[in-house]
Image (spheres, helix red, strand yellow):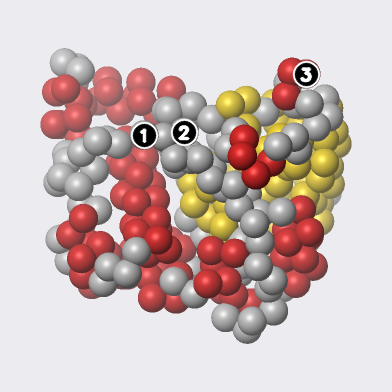
Amino acid sequence: MHKRYTEPLTLNQIAAEVFVSPYHFSRVFARATGVPPGRYLTSVRLFAAKRLLLTTDLTVSDIVCGVGYNSVGTFTSRFTRAVGMSPTQYRDPRVAELLVVVSHEYSCLPGMDEMRRARFLKPRTPGPSHTISGAVDVPEEVGPVDVLVAVFPESVPQGSPVAFEVLSATGRAEFTIADVPSGPHVVIAAAVPKSDRTRSGRMLMSSTRHPVRIARGLRTFVHLPLEDVQETDAPLAITLASPALAFEGKLSRAACIRQTVA
């Protein structure tokens, strides 16, 4: 999928590559990655589209042809629905300033001050809200890390989190995320080592993979053991700049770490 996402791949074609039935492939793939093959392929394509939107001057039409879509209208509507802003809006500099990238190819996490500022400016979701508590475990050899723990309505998020918290951690660290709306949510943690942050490029992550139920009267606790990003992890590119704030000029520039694998 990573090599051929520009092609009109079907489930039958992908399953045939490994000589199994589509049904068996779907079941094994979802068990290994946490998401069905179709959703994984969509995440790969949207990840590529976001990269091109933020790093090139290509038109949306050119990008559509390069990421496996045949129609600009279809791509634009799916992108807007998934991300919460149109491809054109996504090119706003404030989106890139608070970009979080989790991928085996390269990683990107804003600075702690920028993430805290984004959390402070994030508008509260209307309606009842609740609290999620939990703990992250950092491998001993990694040392101190900066951690983002974010809550999303889907297992492979494309848009901004509904709520998030940032913390520094060594070993085990507990956290509490406030203002989480009711419903099923997935909690994802991403972390980078504090040491040599600008050149390391190392990213660790963890996820509940399956939704946890958030509701009044429920005490929700999640355990997130951080591990190095794997090639089988669905690539993520999300921004902490919510659509309501991204275009108001309130967010300062953030420093990202990037590592490109040849």
Q: Position of residue 191 (x, y in %)?
A: 68, 38
**Disc number for residue 140:** 3
Give the distance between the C-alpha atoms of the residues marked 1 and 2, in whole angstroms. Answer: 12 Å
Badge nearest the viewer, 1 or 2: 1
Q: Secondary structure at mark 1?
A: loop
**Disc number for residue 262:** 1
Badge nearest the viewer, 3 or 1: 1
Write down the residue under mark 2. 104
* Of pointers 2 and 3, the one earlier in the residue sequence: 2
Label 1 neighbourhood size at 10 Å, few (<14), some (14-19), many (20+)?
few
Q: Is residue 153 above or below residue 129?
A: above
What amino acid does circle 2 point to? His
Work out which quarter of the rendered image holds the C terminus and state it. Answer: top left
Q: Secondary structure at mark 3?
A: helix
Give the distance between the C-alpha atoms of the residues marked 2 and 3, in whole angstroms. Answer: 21 Å
The structure residue drawn at horizontal position 43% and vertical position 28%, both measured from the top left corner, is 231
Tell me: 203 left or right of 38. Answer: right
Within the image, what quadrant is residue 25 found in? top left
What amino acid does circle 1 point to? Ala
Q: Secondary structure at mark 2?
A: loop
What amino acid does circle 3 point to? Glu
* Of pointers 3 and 1, the one earlier in the residue sequence: 3
